Amino acid sequence: MVTKFLPLPANSGGKQRSLAILRRLAARGEVTLCAFDDGSADHEGLRALGVEVRSVPWTSARTRQLGGVVRTGTLSAGRFWERRLAGQVRAAMAGGEVHLLQVEYAQLAPYLSLGPARLRVLDLHNVESSLAASYARDADPVRGTVARVESAALRRLERRALGVADVVSVVSERDRDRLPRPPRRLLVCPNGWEPGGPLPPASGPVAAFVALMGWRPNQDAALWLVERVWPGVLRRVPDARLLLVGRDPGPALRQLSGPAVEVTGSVEQVQPYLARARVALAPLRSGGGTRLKILEALDAGRPVVATTVGAEGLECLAGNGLTIVDDPDGMAERIATLLRDPARATELGRRGGAAVAARYSWDRTLSPLLDHLAGTP
């Protein structure tokens, strides 16, 4: 298995998906994991799963990025092409017959071709070309031009990768429709969650947006939320408080902090912040994939107010703890209504948690991939 970063601790949506797949592969046979180590990795925890770990340190060296761009043809994929990691993958595949080569993310697709394997699976957390195109729509002219060029480059990379992989898995029907060409075999495996149960009801009118704040769609969402939506909430609920929870918020987000907005930066655990929140938010205006943070909030018993983009892939949860609103005033009204009505918020959160447990356990969402692997000689 090849993924971007060693997925313990599982402190991002991408790591949570990679870890869920890794656990289930390790339960079925011997697994070697090849990935970058961002300095926080729990090697012992991974070895306790029965996984052999082959990692290289993550660096942002420009010389590596330049070589990666030449190798992959794209800026974003070029960040993840590393000769030392490629060497680890080749060495792992040279140790005996490889039944499965599981590669996570489109940016790592070049690693599909580093050695022989009976079955090559590419798991797309997002359709990256579509994601870059969505950046272009909301960016200034200069950044928009760069994003459009990158989108075209990623489209070419994805097209090549879909011709190499035996199986491609995507996280939603919409992402399936965004692929540049049909793969040999396509599986839809939505994101899931390991149910943990509801938290006690929150004591105050607090809303939380939990996300990796260094990711551009989340930065845009947080700015839009604070500038366009939150003033409408405060007009209706003057003592409301907003939590922006997640690492790498950057200066533009940190300066939003004030009496009604708390910007936390990196936190060890999300649960204490969800415990403070009466309602969770997913106000994205660009992006792809499905939002693990929505599943996490609903599992914790917190209703979620989201945009259409924020709820992508989870539309079936609308009415079961999830409300979808796109205009700023409508979103402010819905958030305020839940902040003023603790009983209603608790009931919606309960229904959402039940729906997540019934429909979105990892065993259920990953079953198309796991069933396919079980039937492969």
Image (cartoon, rainbow, N blue to C red):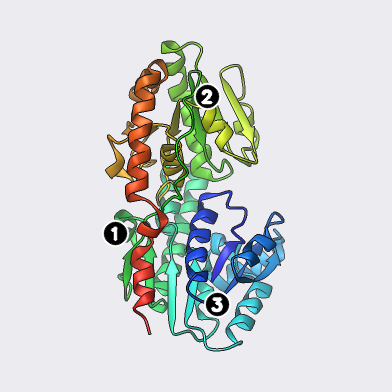
**Residue type marked 1:** Asp
- Judging depth in this view, the residue of 145 and 13 nearest the camera is 13
**Disc 2 on helix, strand or loop?**
strand
Q: Earlier in the sequence, mark 1 or mark 2?
A: 1
Q: Give the labeled residue for mark 1.
A: 177
**Residue type marked 3:** Glu
Up/down of 377 relative to 139, above or below: below
> In the displayed structure, does residue 347 sit left or right of residue 135?
left
Up/down of 146 relative to 57, above or below: above
Give the distance between the C-alpha atoms of the residues marked 1 and 2, in whole angstroms. Answer: 35 Å
Identify which residue is drawn at 32% across, 50% down: 359
**Picture coordinates of residue 22 (x, y %)?**
52, 65
| Mark 3 touches mark 1? (CB < 8 Å) | no
**Picture coordinates of residue 262 (x, y %)?**
60, 25
Q: Give the labeled residue for mark 3.
A: 30
* Nearer to us: label 3 or label 1: 3
Identify which residue is drawn at 56% across, 18% down: 260
**Residue type marked 2:** Leu
Looking at the rendering, in which quadrant would you find the N terminus? bottom right
Mark 2: few, some, or many residues within 10 Å (few <14, many ≥20)?
A: many
* Nearer to us: label 1 or label 2: 2
Mark 1: few, some, or many residues within 10 Å (few <14, many ≥20)?
A: few
Up/down of 336 relative to 5, above or below: above
* Nearer to us: label 3 or label 2: 3
Q: Give the labeled residue for mark 2.
A: 242
**Picture coordinates of residue 212 (x, y %)?**
56, 43
